Amino acid sequence: QADTVIAPSLLAADFARLAEAADAVEGSVDWLHVDVMDNHFVPNLTLGPPIVKSLKAATDIPLDCHLMIEDPKRWAPGYAELGAYNVTFHAEAADDPVRLAKDLRAAGSKAGLAIDRDTPVEDYLEILPAFDTLLIMTIKAGFGGQKFMPELLAKVRTARAHADSGHLELRIEVDGGIADDTIAAAAEAGADAFVAGTAVYGAADPADAARRLRARADA
Ligand code: DX5
Ligand code: ZN
């Protein structure tokens, strides 16, 4: 696993051509970020298990499933069973996040915890040892193409300090508005996994855009 993880978000790709979108970045990225939205946890609707199953068959890029859904206890393990590399659910939607992390690992995936714009990271520091990934939204979850909110990087700094002092093996992933002009600040704050939708799939050459993002994160 590379030190810096670049994870293009398919939310910004053509949903009728997802396999082509995966092929376009294969070899240049580490994970493929799959935004699952249920029109309840967020006011937007995207895709679910059948499409994740097809994606799994269509690409070798590890799938990073970001579940913006209610009742993750019911649905999240299914994504692990379909072969997702990492399954991240939202803290705001989970009643027993540690239990669900265990279930995800038992089902064969890594476990991720996501916190939305208005959720303090302090409330979750104690349970981070149960997780492989902490996803810190740098926008309000729900839609691509929003403006990066630099003030949310304070949460990344807090989480990074906590993870380092506790020697946790934790990826800290940022999601929302990550682009050429914002990724360095996120990396400096301590993030090591970077979701980018518009910045990758809105570019003429997605693979080149992803490589440029990595260079800026590593600079
Ligand atoms: C939004 C999703 C993001 C989205 C980011 O709730 O979680 O993954 O695709 O899109 P950009 O990179 O365009 O902000
Ligand atoms: Zn996402």
Image (cartoon, grey):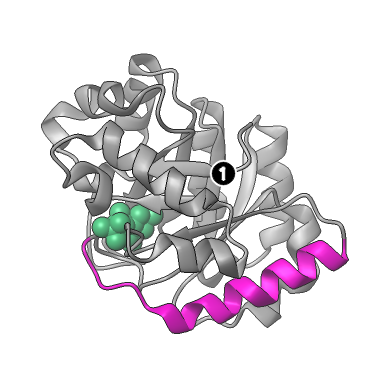
Tell me the residue at 48%/45% (across/down).
Answer: 75
Q: Is residue 160 magenta?
A: yes
Q: Is residue 187 magenta?
A: no
Q: Is residue 73 visible?
A: yes
Q: Is residue 22 left or right of residue 215?
A: left
Q: Main secondary structure of the magenta part?
A: helix
Question: What residue is disc 1 on?
Answer: 4
Q: Relative to 119, does residue 109 appear above or below in the rendering?
A: above
Q: Position of residue 176 (x, y in %)?
A: 36, 63
Q: Is residue 216 left or right of residue 140?
A: right
In this rendered view, identify the residue nearer to me: 124 or 78.
124
Give SS at disc 1. loop
Q: Relative to 57, does residue 140 appear above or below in the rendering?
A: below
Q: Which residues are magenta?
A: 145-166
Tell me the residue at 35%/44% (across/down).
Answer: 212
Q: Is residue 48 visible?
A: no
Residue type at mark 1: give it.
Thr
Cβ of mark 1 under 8 Å from ligand 1: the answer is no
Quadrant of res 117: bottom left
Image quadrant for the N terminus? top right
Q: Is residue 109 left or right of residue 146?
A: right
Q: Position of residue 112 (x, y in %)?
A: 60, 52
- Report crowding for label 1: few under 14, some 14 to 19, many 20 or more residues within 10 A (C-alpha): some
Tell me the residue at 66%/52% (across/down).
Answer: 100
Q: Position of residue 120 (x, y in %)?
A: 59, 83
Count of numbered marks: 1
Q: Position of residue 108 (x, y in %)?
A: 66, 29
Quadrant of res 10: top left
Furthest residue toward right: 166
In this rendered view, identify the residue nearer to me: 45 or 135.
135
Tell me the residue at 48%/60% (across/down).
Answer: 174
Tell me the quadrant of ligand 1.
bottom left
